[in-house]
Amino acid sequence: MDGEEARNSKNYRASKAGRGHDEKANKSGKEGQYMNQEISNLCRFISVIKLRPIMWRQNHPYLLVDKVKDLTDPEELSKNKKTDRTVALYGFSRGAHMNPSYSVHIAGVGDFAPSSVTHLSDPAQLSKEQKNAR
């Protein structure tokens, strides 16, 4: 197919029409640039948005897991690969207070009752100078 046939094909006309449409969508007329008024309107719109709190997060405890440690006895694992495992989850608690009597849902696995919940000190705690600098 030579250049003349390519220019007359439907694909060429469709792609050219698509580029013209993009130029009309941008009021400034320059590709990749926006007018200051458009940016100002977008910033104003974003600043007045009222975010609704997610009630589930406030009413249910959940854990952002940072580290998982398998505490299952290695001898027991060598005898039976499908034995129940004991794991320790380390992370940050969010939402309501965690209680060992609550069941914990692990996505893709199911619901479990934790044997204990303990509080550890923050390993990356800020110094007083860093806290005051904020």
Image (cartoon, helix red, strand yellow):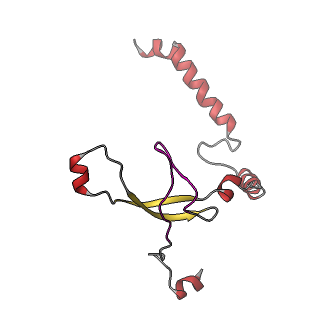
Asked if the magenta segment contains residue 115, the reply would be yes
Q: Is residue 72 above or below residue 118?
A: above
Residue 2 vs residue 25, the one in the foreground: 25
Q: Quadrant of the C terminus?
A: bottom right
Magenta part of the chain: 100-118
Residue 85 coordinates in the image, percent (x, y):
35, 52
Q: How many marks?
A: 0
Along the viewing direction, whichever of 34 and 3 lies nearer the viewer: 34
Is 123 covered by the magenta stretch? no
> Is 74 on the left or on the right of 50, as rendered?
left
Name the residue: 50% across, 85% down.
127
Q: Residue at x 43, y 16 (%)?
A: 3
Residue ranking furthest to the bottom: 129
What secondary structure is the stretch in magenta mostly built from? loop
Residue 27 rendering spot, x and y as whole percentages: 71, 42
- At a point 25% along the width and 52% down the height, the residue shown is 76
* Up/down of 19 relative to 8, above or below: below
Counting from the top left corner in percent of width and height, residue 130 is at 53, 83
